[in-house]
Image (spheres, rainbow, N blue to C red):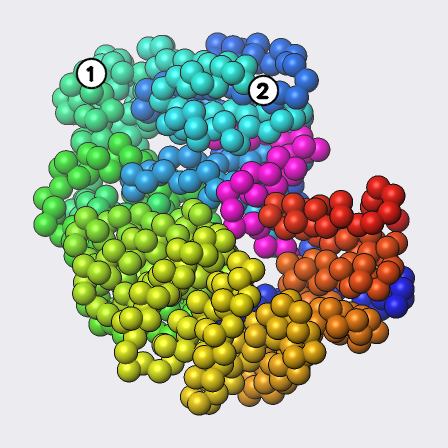
Amino acid sequence: MEQQEVTNRITGQVGTAVMAGTINGGIHIQPTPPPPSPPRQLRAVPRVFTDRAEALDALNATRSPLPEGTAPVIVIHGDAGVGRRTLAARWARQLADEFPDGQLVAPLSGGPTGRYPPVAEIVRRLLGSLGLGVTTPLPGHTDDLLALWRSATASRRLLLVLEEATTDQGVVPLVPANPGCLIVVTSRTVLPALAAHGAHHLHLSPLAPGHALVLLRRIIGEKRVAAEPHAAVRLVEACGGLPLALGLAGGELALNPARTLTDHVELSPPQPGALSVTITNAIDQMPDEQRRLLADIAQLPAPDLDGHTVAASTATPVSRTTRLLEELSARHLLDRTGDVAGRGPVYAIRPEVADRALALNERAGTGTTVVQRYLDFLTATAYETGRILTPHHRVLEHSSRHEPAEPVRFADDTSALGWLEVMASALLPALDAATKHGEHRAATCVVHAAWPLFHYTRRYEELWIPAHRQGLAAAERWGDTMGIREMLSTLAAGLRGMRSYDEAISCLRRALTLAEGDLEGIAQYTSGIGACLHADGRYAESMPHLVDAAARYERLGRARGQGLALILIGSAHARQGEPATGVPVLQEARMLLSALTDPDLVNAARAEAFLGEAHSLAGEHDLAAAALVQALEQFRSFGVPYWTAHVMEFLGQAAIRGGQRKSALEWYGTSLDHYTELASRHDIARLQRRISAVPGPAAQLGG
C-alpha cells in the first residue's frame, strides 16, 4: 500500500483530543482548544510606585548589543523589602512592546515551604504558558523538557522575569540561546556564575528620604503627612527607606484613620531591623481573628493559598476565610498573585511575614493539627479527582481525622485536571512537612491519592520518583503492608517510565513477596515484571511472567488485565522470530479489550499496532499495512501523540520489509517530526539509527 493512499485516509482536522492511560482510566474527550494568545504575565505596578529613575536609567544602559547567540541577562539584587520585583515589573512593562511573543514570569523561590522548585517544574510552567502541552503532552524527562524549551524560544522574542533566584543553577538552564529574548532576574544576592552569560548586576538601594516621604504621602494622603511633618520624617527613618516597610506602616495608618503618625512612630524604633519591626507592629495591631489566621497560615507547607485550602486547614468556614485573606492582603501581609478558575483569589505569604508570624506565634502548638488538616484536604481532593479521572485505581483504606467540612467537587475532567496542577507544586513540600511532624500514614495516603497527577502528567524526575521514594519511606515507618505494596508498585511504574527497568523490577519483586493471599495483587506485580522485561528488550525472560499473569487474570475473570498481558506475549513471540504464534494472541488481546463493559479502546489500538508488526514480521505485508493504518487512525482520533508517532515508525519498518524504501523514509520522516514535537530524545535517537541503516543512497527525509 502506498503511503499517499494512507495519508489521504488519515489526515484532516481532529475535532477532539482524547487523553487515556495504558493502565488506568478511560478515554476523556475534550474540545480542541483555540491557539493561545501570547502570555502577558508581568506583575501590576502599584499605583503609589515612587522614583527609581536612577535605577531605571541604569537598567536601560545595560541594553548594549551582545554577541550573537546570547540572550541578555540583567540581575536586580538587594535587601528584603527593597522592591526588586516591583522595579523589575516597572522596567519590563516599559519594554513589553519589544517582545510581542510574550512576557513570562517564573518564581524561583519556594516561598515559606523552604523547597525550591526543580528546574523541570519551572520549564514545564513556562512551556505551558506558551501553549505547549495542551494537545501534546510535555516530556517526562528534564533534559527533554530543556531541549523543548530551547526549541520553543529559538524563534520567539520573549521577556522572561525570574523572581527571587537564590543560586545560579536555577537560572542558567532557563537562559535561551536567542539574542532576541531578555532575561530579568531578581535576587537578594549577586549571582556571579551568570557573568559567563554577560549578565549585568544592578544593586537596588533603599529609597532616599525625600522619595520615601513622597511614597508615604501617596499611601496615606498629603493631608496626614502635612499635619504631622516631623512624625512623618521619623516614620520614614524608622522604615529605613524600604518600600515594603513603608507599605506595611502606611497600610496600618490607612486602615486606622484615627491613629496619629506620632502614635505609630512610637511603635517603630529606627533601623536596623526596620522591616522586621514594621511587620511585628502590623501583626500586633491587627484584630485577633486576623492574627490567628495568619499564625496558622505561616505554619502551612503550601506554596500558595486559596479560600478552600485555608478553610480546610484551619477548620474555618470558606466564606470567613475568603474575607480574612482579603483583609490580610489589604494590610500587605499577603501578596495576591492572581485569580484562578475553580480556586478564586490566590495569595502567597511573604517569607519575611511568615518568619515573624512564626516567631510571634502564640499558637505554635497548633502546627501539627494545621498540617494534619492540610494533608487530609490534599488527600480527599486528590481522591475526588481520581473518582473522575482514574476510576479503576485502587483506593487505599485510610481514616481521615479531619475530613474537610466543605470539600472541593469537580464538575468535569477539565476542572479536575486543573486542580492537579495545584497539587503538582504542593505535593513535595507537603511530604516534607509530613515527615517533620511524623505523619507517616498521611504521607503515604496523599502520595497514593495523587495517582491521577502522576498518571496524566508523567513528571517522572521532578515529581513521580521523589514523591514515591518519600511515600515508600513513610509507608515503611507507618508499617502498613498494603501501603508499602502500593508505593512499590507505583514507584516501579515511574521507574519504568524513566527506563530504570532493573530497579523497577526490584520494587515489584519486593511487592510480590508482601502480596501473599492477594491473588489480584500477585497477578498485577507479575505482569509488571514481565512488562519491564519486555520494555527492556528481554523478551524470552519476560515470557514466563507474562504467561503466568495472563493465566491468573483469566482465573480471576479480569479480562482487562489478561488482555494487557496478552499484548506483550504476542509481541514477544513476534519479535523472537515466532510471528505466526504471536498473531492469534494479539487478536485475542484486541478482542478482550474491545469487548469490556467499558471498552479500553486505547489499549485495543495498541494490540492492533503490535498485530500489524507481527503480520509484517511474518511477511504478510497487506495485512500488516491494514492493521497499522487502522491503529494509526485510532490513535490520531484519540489524540494519543506518542503512539501516533510509534505506529508511523512501525509503518516505516513494515515498508522496509516490503522493499518499499521510499515509503519507509517518508514514514520515518513523519514519525521523526512527531517525536521531535514530543521532544522524546530516546525515540529520536533510535529512529535516527533506523534511518541511517536504510539501504541505498544516503537517506533524504521529507517530501
Q: Position of residue 337 (x, y in %)?
A: 43, 42
For badge 2, the amino acid type reads Pro
| Lower position in the chain sequence, tag 1 or tag 2 | 2
From the viewer's perspective, tell me whether residue 206 is left or right of residue 35.
Answer: left
Is residue 561 visible to us here?
A: no
The residue that label 2 is drawn on is: 72
Dividing the picture into quarters, in which one does residue 597 lie?
bottom right
Q: Residue at x 64, y 67 (%)?
A: 575
Q: Is residue 425 magenta?
A: no
Vertical side of 509 occupied by 586: above or below: below
Q: Nearer the viewer, residue 245 or 436?
A: 436
Q: Is residue 147 magenta?
A: yes
Which labelled disc corresponds to residue 663? none
Question: What residue range appears in magenta?
Answer: 135-163
The residue that label 1 is drawn on is: 272
Front tag of 1 and 2:
2
Classify mark 1: residues with Cα within 10 Å, few (<14), some (14-19) or many (20+).
few
Question: What element does badge 2 sit on?
Answer: loop
Is residue 469 visible to us here?
A: yes
Count of numbered marks = 2
Q: Residue at x 65, y 14 (%)?
A: 67
Q: Nearer the viewer, residue 221 or 429?
A: 429
Q: Position of residue 490 (x, y in %)?
A: 39, 63
Q: Residue at x 51, y 85 (%)?
A: 559
Classify mark 2: residues with Cα within 10 Å, few (<14), some (14-19) or many (20+).
many
For badge 1, the amino acid type reads Pro
Q: Residue at x 27, y 71 (%)?
A: 514
Q: How much space separates mark 1 and mark 2, taking CA atoms?
A: 35 Å
From the viewer's perspective, tell me whether residue 516 is left or right of residue 58.
Answer: left
